[in-house]
């Protein structure tokens, strides 16, 4: 069994941004802007045990060596589930505990910088990493995804539970109720912040989670069905991790995922929606956020994750490649990019949203996103009086009762719940499907007819962006629920059967190719390999695969943009990460946008 397989089985182990992660960035991430030399980092790591200290933590320790009382938020993972004595030792070092994170055999702490070395030297500690801040990232949606086929077959998500890990859900919204009965079966807050507005308890002060919930399962009550969600009778489980400003952290999301797994049988939770994320600062096997989503996947829950809204970032001509956010970089989960409906019901004229993040992933070079879905100018349920509504009142959409019934948002945050709702319909049709079988079928049956390229214009700046329809941009294609529900094919049920593959670079030929089951990431996948179940030509199709597009020098980079390639590929993973993500809000943006894209 190789390292990839062990990591899979041991864990049973905008457009204007509606809000930027940078508004509420923690001290830990701000410190990343202090660039330390590689030599200094290595010297520090040698003193403290490199195997236990993430490079980010080492940089923080070096930068604040003269200020040992400076506080930093970290996630401490232990070799075994920590007992009270181990947790007490951190507290004796001045640490304040946040969430217990049994899912990753650890806990979140706020610790003085001067205590980090002693913490790392604890023999029970396995790894110390930064507790990163993160943020949240209709009528045309249903037509583009061919939801009509599901409606005609009487699938509406009945009996399926979807956990929405977001800013909360305002369940007084009648679109999320059956008469007087709320379909939001459970609320829990992981932010520790107030949930009151005008002395009334409101679970979604930011407004993002309610919009996401409406795309998944709104019934269109306030619009005569016009703005119904994909699975209009699904049950929703509200796990609030983003506060009134849309800010959250790794540890809060991990704790919420942990709770979703614990509640799985109680509410038949089969899907988790994560319309949020952050930059990538390590490979997915070291990232506790990625480990958490893998645990949910291993528990039989389909985890649907937004790719991110960073597709316009072009460092040295990189054209937005290499910008998929975590945990969408994990090869197990189903990662979603955003399409534009172009204001028509037909999907034949739909185009990729230029802000939709593109692969391959930083560090691991995994092929992402897996699929794309409608995400631009999506109308869905509104949380009245929320931060987003107050900031962008022009986005209000009238329903049958008031001008505040619905709200318009764009982004991969909106494309993700469209897919999550579709997954609920598939599981209603066949409750025995495993997460890998759901992912494989959606990828195989995706609509794969795209133009070679398209040009988008930012309406606020007039800037234009050219997008190409390769597998790093649209994945395996545009989700087609009608085709997915009609297709009886079953991938092998084992975990990892539908791992997203990696790509490898051959410096002697300059070629970048899919590993086809032979590389480190896809070695245990039995679906995409050219000689196994379906083959890459079936999954990606002629329009989104082929040597000229896998890393098309003739399409993406060209001879004049070799520096762009080096930004994404990097002479080392650390170089690629620091250039693409850095410490600014460019690497910490919200996954929703407030303007349309032309």
Image (spheres, helix red, strand yellow):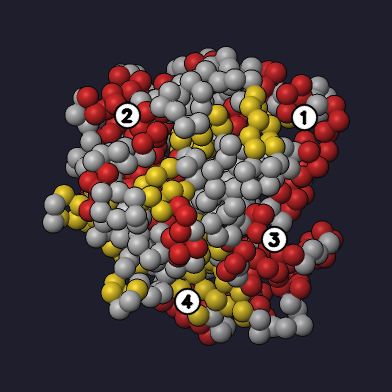
| Residue closest to the eye, 9 or 114 | 114
Residue 263 appears in the rendering: no
Q: Which residue is mark 2?
A: 147
Q: Residue at x 22, y 31 (%)?
A: 155
* Residue that badge 3 annotates: 583
Q: Which mark is residue 378?
A: none
The Cα atoms of the two marked residues, 3 and 4, are separated by 25 Å
Q: Is residue 202 visible?
A: yes
Label 4–label 2 contact, CB within 8 A: no
The reply to whether the C-beta atoms of the residues labelled 3 and 1 are less than 8 Å apart is no
How far, Cα to Cα, is label 3 from label 1? Answer: 26 Å
| Tag in front: 3 or 2 | 2
Q: Residue at x 27, y 44 (%)?
A: 223
Q: Residues within 10 Å of mark 3 (few under 14, many from 20)?
A: many
Q: Is residue 250 left or right of residue 453?
A: left
Q: Label 4 neighbourhood size at 10 Å, few (<14), some (14-19), many (20+)?
A: some
**Does label 3 or label 1 sit earlier along the sequence?**
1
Seen as rendered, the residue at the extreme left is 180
| Cβ atoms at labels 3 and 2 below 8 Å apart | no
Give the vertical position of 18 relative to 501 (above or below).
below
């Amino acid at each position: 069994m190789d390292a990839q397989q062990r990591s899979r089985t041991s864990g049973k182990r905008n457009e204007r941004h509606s809000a930027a992660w940078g508004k509420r960035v923690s001290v830990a991430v701000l410190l990343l802007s202090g660039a330390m030399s590689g030599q200094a980092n290595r010297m520090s790591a040698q003193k403290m045990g490199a195997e236990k200290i993430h490079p980010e933590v080492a940089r923080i320790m070096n930068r604040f060596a003269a200020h040992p009382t400076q506080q930093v938020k970290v996630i401490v993972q232990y070799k075994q589930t920590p007992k009270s004595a181990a947790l007490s030792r951190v507290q004796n070092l001045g640490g304040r505990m946040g969430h217990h994170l049994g899912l990753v055999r650890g806990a979140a702490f706020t610790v003085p910088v001067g205590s980090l070395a002693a913490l790392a030297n604890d023999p029970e500690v396995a790894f110390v990493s930064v507790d990163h801040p993160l943020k949240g990232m209709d009528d045309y949606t249903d037509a583009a995804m061919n939801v009509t086929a599901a409606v005609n077959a009487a699938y509406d998500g009945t009996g399926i539970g979807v956990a929405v890990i977001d800013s909360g859900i305002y369940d007084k919204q009648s679109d999320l109720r059956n008469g007087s009965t709320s379909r939001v079966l459970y609320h829990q807050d992981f932010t520790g912040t107030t949930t009151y507005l005008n002395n009334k308890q409101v679970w979604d002060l930011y407004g993002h989670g309610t919009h996401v919930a409406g795309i998944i399962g709104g019934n269109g009550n306030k619009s005569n069905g016009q703005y119904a969600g994909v699975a209009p009778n699904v049950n929703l489980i509200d796990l609030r991790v983003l506060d009134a400003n849309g800010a959250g952290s790794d540890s809060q999301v991990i704790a919420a995922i942990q709770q979703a797994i614990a509640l799985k049988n109680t509410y038949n939770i089969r899907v988790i929606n994560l319309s949020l994320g952050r930059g990538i600062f390590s490979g997915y096997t070291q990232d506790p956020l990625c480990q958490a989503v893998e645990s949910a996947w291993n528990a039989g829950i389909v985890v649907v994750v937004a790719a991110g809204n960073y597709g316009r970032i072009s460092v040295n001509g990189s054209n937005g490649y290499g910008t998929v956010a975590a945990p969408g970089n994990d090869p197990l989960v189903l990662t979603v990019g955003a399409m534009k409906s172009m204001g028509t019901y037909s999907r034949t004229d739909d185009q990729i949203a230029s802000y939709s993040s593109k692969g391959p992933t930083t560090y691991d070079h995994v092929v992402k996103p897996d699929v794309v879905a409608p995400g631009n100018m999506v109308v869905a349920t509104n949380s009245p009086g929320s931060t987003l509504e107050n900031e962008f009142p022009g986005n209000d959409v009238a329903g049958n009762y008031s001008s505040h019934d619905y709200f318009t948002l764009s982004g991969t945050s909106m494309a993700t719940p469209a897919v999550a709702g579709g997954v609920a319909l598939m599981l209603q049709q066949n409750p025995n499907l495993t997460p890998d079988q759901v992912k494989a079928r959606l990828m195989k049956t995706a609509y794969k007819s795209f133009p070679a390229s398209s040009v988008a214009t930012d309406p606020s700046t007039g800037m234009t962006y050219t997008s190409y329809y390769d597998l790093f941009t649209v994945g395996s294609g545009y989700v087609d629920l009608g085709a997915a529900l009609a297709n009886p094919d079953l991938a092998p049920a084992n975990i990892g059967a539908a791992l997203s593959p990696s790509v490898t670079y051959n410096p002697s030929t300059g070629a970048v190719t899919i590993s086809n089951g032979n590389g480190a990431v896809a070695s245990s996948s039995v679906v995409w390999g050219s000689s196994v179940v379906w083959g890459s030509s079936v999954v990606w199709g002629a329009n989104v695969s082929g040597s000229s597009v896998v890393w098309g020098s003739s399409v993406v980079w060209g001879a004049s943009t070799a520096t762009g390639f080096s930004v994404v590929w990097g002479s080392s993973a650390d170089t690629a990460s620091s250039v693409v993500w850095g410490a600014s809000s460019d690497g910490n943006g919200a996954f929703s946008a407030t303007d349309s894209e032309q």
